[in-house]
Amino acid sequence: MIFRHLQKSFIVWPICRTLSQKRRLEEHYQHAHPETLVFHGDLRMPATVQKIANMCKKKNVSPYAVIHCSGPITYTSCSIPEWNIWEKQTEDNLAPSIHLIKTLSERMKSGRIVMFAFSGVDTHRGFKNISAYAAAKESVVVLARAAAKKLADKGITVNVIAPGVFLTETGKIPAHGKTMLPSIPANRFGTSEDICGVVDWLLSDESAYVTGQIIKVSGGLHI
Ligand SMILES: NC(=O)c1ccc[n+]([C@@H]2O[C@H](COP(=O)([O-])OP(=O)(O)OC[C@H]3O[C@@H](n4cnc5c(N)ncnc54)[C@H](OP(=O)(O)O)[C@@H]3O)[C@@H](O)[C@H]2O)c1
């Protein structure tokens, strides 16, 4: 959804994990947006991001923005150490963030980096079923803040969007959201428009002096 939305104003290079998704996007966009380059790869692998950096070099272009919105949630108990889930969460959430910032910021002249966490970050509370996910997302925030300091003099801002509970693209309530509506002060789940509006602002000139911040888009969940 963010990809489709951004295509109205930017040339976007999405990264797909499966070849079938890559082909589907290429077929769909080749006429309306022939400049769209669709990459295939797993963001947990540094080579995936390196491919994009190499293409920037080949085409002699600098990315204006990097928007990193992968990072699936995995449920785990905090009382029983399920180490494989902790490792998986680090791999799924932190590793891609490191590869993207490290490799692509070198090619950026100025611009924006936007990472995704979840609305429970920075609340200093324990989470019963998502402790590994929460820890990985806290690490993404710490990384984003460190990068914000390092990259500020290049005119690159680094911020984190922290969503609450969002409807899926087909308008369904996600499995983890079913019992959460009473905890959301806005009394509704988030929609893709709620996220796209914040992404637009973070990519605009109006947010040029905002860096190292977490923007919670949650209807008040976890405040
Ligand atoms: N959805 C929510 O309610 C919610 C709430 C709080 C925070 N968030 C955060 O917001 C962000 C977006 O949420 P989402 O539910 O759309 O995330 P998601 O489940 O990770 O899916 C986003 C896309 O990223 C792709 N992807 C995942 N891991 C990848 C990898 N290693 N390499 C390449 N592509 C990969 C997925 O591809 P596949 O289709 O192949 O899996 C999918 O197309 C995530 O960081 C999430 O943690 C979401």
Image (tube, rainbow, N blue to C red):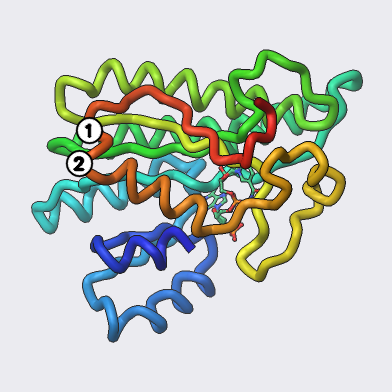
Image position of 4 with respect to 150: above or below: below
Q: Is residue 84 above or below residue 152?
A: below
Task: Tell me the number on the disc at residue 157.
Answer: none
- What residue is at 84 percent from the left and 22 percent from the top? 78
- The single residue placed furthest to the right in the displayed view is 80
Label 1 residue near ligand 1, CB within 8 Å: no
Q: Residues within 10 Å of mark 1 (few under 14, many from 20)?
A: some
- Between 2 and 23, the one lying in front of the other is 2
Give coordinates of residue 211: x percent, y percent. 32, 25
Query: Who's the residue at 16% across and 20% down the image?
Result: 153
- Number of marks in the rendered image: 2
Q: At x 54% / y 22%, what residue is drawn?
A: 139
**Quadrant of the snapshot with the C terminus:** top right
Residue 191 % position (x, y):
59, 57
Circle 1: residue type: Ala
Q: Nearer the viewer, residue 8 or 184?
A: 184
* Residues tagged 1 and 2 counted as in contact (Cβ below 8 A): yes
Up the image or down, 186 lies above or below 121; here it is: below
Crowding near the residue tagged with mark 2, few <14, some 14–19, many ≥20 C-alpha atoms within 10 Å = few
Residue 29: image quadrant is bottom left
**Image check: 142 left or right of 26?**
right
Dot 2 amino acid type: Asp
Examine the image and state in which quarter residue 74 appears: top right
Which residue is under mark 2? 205
User: From this viewpoint, which residue is outermost toward the front?
Assistant: 186
Vertical order, 82 against 30 (above or below): above
Task: Give me the C-alpha separation between circle 1 and circle 2.
Answer: 5 Å
- The numbered disc on residue 208 is 1
Element carrying mark 1: loop
3 vs 106, left or right, is right
